[in-house]
Structures are given as structure tokens and as C-alpha cells.
Image: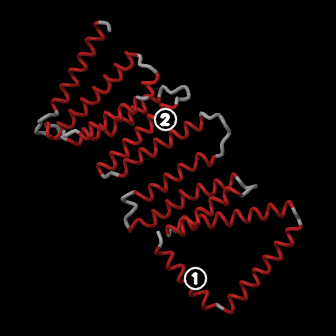
Amino acid sequence: LSPPHRLGLTTAILLTRYAIMQGKNNSNLQQAKTWIYVGFLEGYAVAIYIINLLSITEILRYCLSAITAIISYFIYLLPWENWGWPLQPWRRIAVIMPIATIFITNLKLDTPPPWYWYASILITSGFYIVIAKVNQQIRLTYISVGLMNCAFVIWLNNLGASLQTLIYITPIGLSLLYIAKVDPILKLPKNKNIRHNLRLFGSGIICFIALLENQWTGLLPGIISVIAIFTGLGLRTRAFLYVGTVTFLINTFNQLIILNSLYSFFKWIIGLLVGVAFIWIAASFETRREQINNLLQNWIEELEEWE
């Protein structure tokens, strides 16, 4: 390093230490927090400056987020209050550091990342899961979900193959279902409808994208809709049952139209079967009107008790 660089670096390190020490044993809590944040920002900038000066190897650069996550883990757990610093700023810093590092290092991702970059993202995601469990803050896992989704999309884009939109949409839909399942606010009884609508949207985009992209075969939307139906029945969840049933019916109707267009003979068979079905339904309804009404009423009441 040249003398000016050494002087600037030494000054920055001393200022970082000064700011952090000003936050120690400070009677003014807000002032102490401010000093810690200022010290962290300056220290983080110094670290980035040093990394750029050292021209670190590609492997280390791609693994910076994992290294930062490991450092942040210890920062989060250290007993700062016993040492005279307020705890909250350090924990916030620990949460921010890994995601900030990913953002900064990804600005230079002009080539497809190697496998150890994905491993680094996975480790960082694991950090947020662990911190969420330690501190009982389930919403921190949303960061993990977002990171894994982004890594998955980057991996798909770098495959160089033509892929269905469903592959991109499925992680988003599953993420929404995860949020509907674990979010503490959505778990409240008063937010049952919001939770239901979020499940409808999350499962709906998966089912209907599958339906749109596989109109001719119908196999994939058929499988997904059946899975949704049985999941709804098993978990007593209305959204999955509704979406699965609607998707299954639309897919079945669409396949009948395709068969009818390809084989005109099916038109007469389908018409005959539909006619017989309507006659049977009408006859059954007339003879068992009261029983059917009671059954429907009980079924609707039971569905209202489902998730």
C-alpha cells in the first residue's frame, strides 16, 4: 500500500473504533445506538475497501456471503449488554450484514456463478433460519425463502434451456403458501379470510399456469389438481380443495373439447352421457330434495369450519 492509502485506512479504522466505543456505556440509549450504527457503516466500508485492494480470488468473492453469515451469527449471539453496549443495534447489524453482502457481491456477477456460490447462498439462508428459531422471529425465514427463490431463478436462467413458466412460478406459489401457514399475524382468527385468499392465490397460480401451458396433454394439470384436492381434504383446507376442483373440472372439460375436435364420434357419446347424467340428477333431486338440501347445508357448514 502507498503511504496515502495506509494513512486513509488507518484513519478509517481509528474512526470506526472511536464510533463503536462511543456507544459503550453511554447513558443516552439513542445516542449509543446511533454511534454503533455509524461505526458499523464505516467499518463495513473499510472491509469492502480492503477486499477490493487485496484483489481476492474468485472463490473467496463468491463465498463472502457465507463468511459474513458465520460472522453475523456470532455477532448476534454475543453478550453485548454485559460488555456495556445496547443489544438491539448489534442484532440488527447481524441480520443486515449477510443480505447486504449478497447484494454488493452480486453487482459483479456478470458470468454464471459456480456451484459454491449457490452453497454460499444456502448457508446464508440457513443463517436466517437459525436466527429465526433462536429469537422466535419466524418472519426472518422470509429472507431465506427469498434468497433460495432468487438462487433457483438464477440457476434456471443459466441452464440455457427453454423452460415452462410453471417452473418459475411454482416457488413463488409455494412461498405464498408458506407465508400463509406460518405468519403470526395471518394466524389470528380475524385474518382467516386473508389467509384463505393468500392460499387461493398461491395455489391458484400454480394450478392455472400448469393448465395454460399443458392444454393439449392435460396430464400435468390433472396430477397437480388431484394433489391439491387430496391435500385440501387431508389438511381440511378450503383453498386447496376449491382450486384443485376448479382446475380438475376445467382440465376435464378442455380435454373433452380436444377429443371432440379430433374424433367427431365422441361428440355423440359425450352428448349421450351428459344427457343421461342430467336426467339422473334431475330425477334424484326430485325424489330426494330434502335429503340433498340437508346434505349440502351440512357440507357448507363443515367447510366454513375448515382453514
Residue found 18% across the figure and 38% down from its top: 80
The image position of residue 103, as x and y in percent, is 43, 33
Distance between mark 1 and mark 2 Cα atoms: 51 Å
Residue found 58% across the figure and 45% down from its top: 168
Residue that badge 1 annotates: 296
Circle 1/circle 2 CB separation < 8 Å = no
At label 2, the amino acid type is Tyr
Image quadrant of residue 60? top left
Please, which residue is most extreme toward the right here?
265
Image quadrant of residue 78? top left
Residue 301 vs 211, above or below: the answer is: below
Please, which residue is most extreme toward the top here?
3
Image quadrant of residue 272? bottom right
Q: Is mark 1 on a helix, strand or loop?
A: helix
- Which disc is residue 118 wearing? 2
The image position of residue 83, as x and y in percent, is 14, 36
Mark 2: few/some/many CA within 10 Å (<14, 14-19, 20+): many
Q: What element carries label 2?
A: helix
